[in-house]
Image (cartoon, helix red, strand yellow):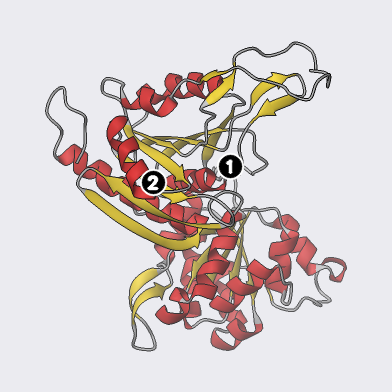
Amino acid sequence: MSTNKPVRVLLGVSGGIAAYKSPDLVRRLRERGAEVRVVLTPAAGRLVSPLVFQAVSGQPVRSDPWDEQAEAAMGHIELARWAELIVIAPATANVIAELAGGHAGSLLTTCCLASTAPLYLAPAMNQAMWRHPATQENCARLRARGVHFIGPDEGEQACGDMGPGRMAEPERIAAELLQPGTAAAGPLQGLTVLVSAGPTREPIDPVRFVSNRSSGRMGFAVAEAAAAAGARVTLLAGPVSLPTPPGVERVDVETAGDMYREAMARAPEADIYIGAAAISDYRPADVRPQKIKKRSDRLALDMVRSADVLAAIAALDDGPFTVGFAAETEKLEEHARAKLMGKHLDMIVANLVGENLGFDCADNEAVVLWQGGRQALARCAKPELARQIIELVAERYRARHRAPASIGQPAVS
């Protein structure tokens, strides 16, 4: 975000022991030119005095939704309109759960609901609380709404435990908020990633088409995870009703032909191509110029093969690291491995589809295959599954570039 003028940052502080770090975060944000206002939950106010935050921010501190000194006693609306960025640090398990459930029980959560500003959370809690399925489900739900997470870090905790759950350091949080690119590099930092997602629609006549049940959720989650990992991401999106992931360039397409043209135009410049789209394998040979009338009991369509985007990209000379997806109803690994080898892919992500599986579901599981390797990913929310997939993609991409294949051979590792 540009710092040509002061960026207005609303800092929310919830009641975790890591609240002692939050005054330092105010200082580091102001060093970068931000104007900072602070909202405390009642529990946070018992851990760190509001006077401390007032001193380091130079602004009144709010915690009471019924503050008579606020504009027309509507402090939450005033703050929500003022903020250009909202960050909660520390974000406890409780405040994460409240936000995931859409609750407005405090001035802080009410401001979040009333604002359209980007929301960042810096989680801080005991490692068991962070790992708990309820917390992970809440985080996945928030990620799906476009909420950004910074951390948590791993290490020794105030309770004596070791593991993930430490609040990210104030310097890192300030850098990620106000100076993108200065924070710790992600595993895809500096790389260009092309992702395809969603279904395609193959027209029969002006009002009918052939398509499939893909919702696009998995591909969109993969695009968001790649961007979060530091990549420059272009998303080729079939016809879906999903918001564009933050930090992602989106190109909307309709048919398999559209997808092929856009993908082939961009693939030579990409380091990685992830083909998560459910592209129609067949399309009507002839598109009727007028609506087909119901004149008989049977209607036959002559279908022809669509261009194979995945195989075409994998066959490019000096093409990108190519990752395919395989949605199967039976013999999952057998069919997926045949696709991996037959199309000379670098990696394939395979999952079963059917009733309550894959399409139209908020969660999924997968098996990731590459030549000589395999890793099963347990069922979880699609944003979390996407994050794990991107970690594997980054790992295998780096492995291939450490040990390039022989000239004339498919690049596999």
Disc 1, disc 2: CB below 8 Å?
A: no
The residue identified by callout 1 is 214
Q: Quadrant of the N terminus?
A: top right
Above-or-below relation of 121 to 166: above
Q: Report the Cα–Cα distance between label 1 and label 2.
A: 15 Å
Amino acid type for the residue under numbered disc 1: Ser
| Residue 206 sits in quarter | top right
The residue identified by callout 2 is 349
Above-or-below relation of 80 to 1: below
Coordinates of residue 246 in the picture (x, y in percent): 55, 45
Residue 72, label in figure:
none
Coordinates of residue 297 in the picture (x, y in percent): 78, 25
Left or right? Give the position of 222 relative to 354. left
Label 1 vs 2, first from the N-terminus: 1
Amino acid type for the residue under numbered disc 2: Val
The residue located at (13%, 24%) in the rendering is: 407
Q: Residues within 10 Å of mark 1 (few under 14, many from 20)?
A: many
The residue located at (50%, 47%) in the rendering is: 224
Of 379 and 262, nearer the camera is 379
Q: Residues within 10 Å of mark 2 (few under 14, many from 20)?
A: many
